[in-house]
Amino acid sequence: MQMMSPTASAAGAVGSVFGRTGAVTASAGDYTTAQVTESGNLYFTDDRARAAVTWGALSGKPAAFAPAGHAASHQNGGGDEIATAAPAANAIPKAGASGRLAAGWLPLPGGSSIGGVQAGDCSSVGFVQKINADGSVSCASGGQGGQASARTWTYFWQGAAQAGATGFAVNLPAAGAPVFANSGGTRPIATLEWPAGQSAYYSWWTFILPAGYPSNGPISYALETRSADSTNYANVYLGVACGGAAVVDNPAIVETAAIQIQAAASNGRTVRTGSITPGSGGLPACAAGDRVWINLRVDANVAGHVMTQPFDLISALFSVQGGL
C-alpha cells in the first residue's frame, strides 16, 4: 500500500473564522458596528438621538400651549386640593367652615409689631395698667379680682358770697395777705384778691396725700383767675412743702418757676393748668401719708408789666393719684 501526502491548501485560503474551523456559520457577537465604516447614515445612540431633536428643528409645532382648565381641582374638595384649614408648617391656608382662618395661622405679634397687642397676664400682679406703643402690656399692683385700685383724688377751693358777705376756703397770713372780694353783678361770687403793684402777698392750702400715692408723683393744678387789666400780667408762684413729721405751723416752702397769667379780656375768666413734680427741680420729696402744703404767691409788679388792676383768684383745684 502506498501512502499519499495530503493535498496542499490553496494559497490564501481561510484557515478558520472567528477561531472556528470547518463549516462555520454566523454567531452572535461576530460583528460590531465599530467594524463598519460609517458614511451619511449614522447608527443609533441615545446621545445622538437627543442631540438631533431640538425645538428649533421641529416643524409644525404650535406657537403656544394653552393649559387646560384645572382650578377646580385645586379648590376645596377638588381632586388635587392644595390648601388646608389646619395650621401646619409651610402649608397653604384656607378658611374653615366659619369663613375665618384658624388661630394657629396668625403669629403672635412681637415687640416691633405695629398695632398688635402681645399676650400678657397681669392677674398675679394686679391689673392691666396700659398697652404700650410696641404692643406690650404694663401691669400695676393692687386691685380686687383684676379691677383697678387707683383713682384721682381732688382738692378744690373757692369762695362764697352770702348776703353781701364774702369768704374763701383758704389759709391767710396775719399780714401781707390777699383780701376777700366780691365779683359784683346779680349773681356774684367771692374771689381772693391781690392788690395791683404788689409782689409778696400769699395764701396756702394743705392736705394729706392719700394711700397709694406714688412717691414724688405729680400734683396737678388748675387755677381760675380774672383781672380787669388784660394788658399786663402777673407771675404766680406755687410753693411746695411736704413731710410726714413736719412742723405744721412752719413748713419749709420751696417755690416753682413763675407761672405767667394774663387776663384774656377785661374781667375775663382765665384757667391755667399744669403740674408740680415733687423731688425734682429743688422741690422737696413727697410720699403717701405726708401732709403737703401748696403756697400761692402773686407778683403783680413784674417790671414792664405792672398790673394796674387787682388780680383775682376764683378757684383752685389740685389733684393727685392714689388708692381707692
Image (tube, rainbow, N blue to C red):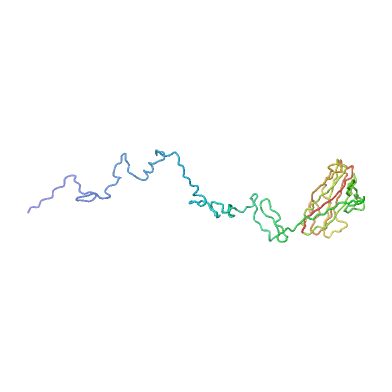
Whole-percent x and y of residue 13?
18, 46
Taking depth in this image into account, of 225 and 209 the one nearest to the observer is 225
Count of marks placed on residues: 0
Task: Indicate the quadrant where residue 45 lies.
Answer: top left
- Quarter of the image where the N terminus is located: bottom left
Whole-percent x and y of residue 125?
70, 60
| Residue found at the far left of this picture | 1
Taking depth in this image into account, of 223 and 280 the one nearest to the observer is 223
Whole-percent x and y of residue 66?
46, 42
Q: Is residue 154 left or right of residue 91?
A: right
Taking depth in this image into account, of 140 and 103 the one nearest to the observer is 103
Q: Is residue 30 left or right of residue 266?
A: left
Taking depth in this image into account, of 275 and 35 the one nearest to the observer is 275
- Quarter of the image where the C terminus is located: bottom right
Whole-percent x and y of residue 264?
83, 42
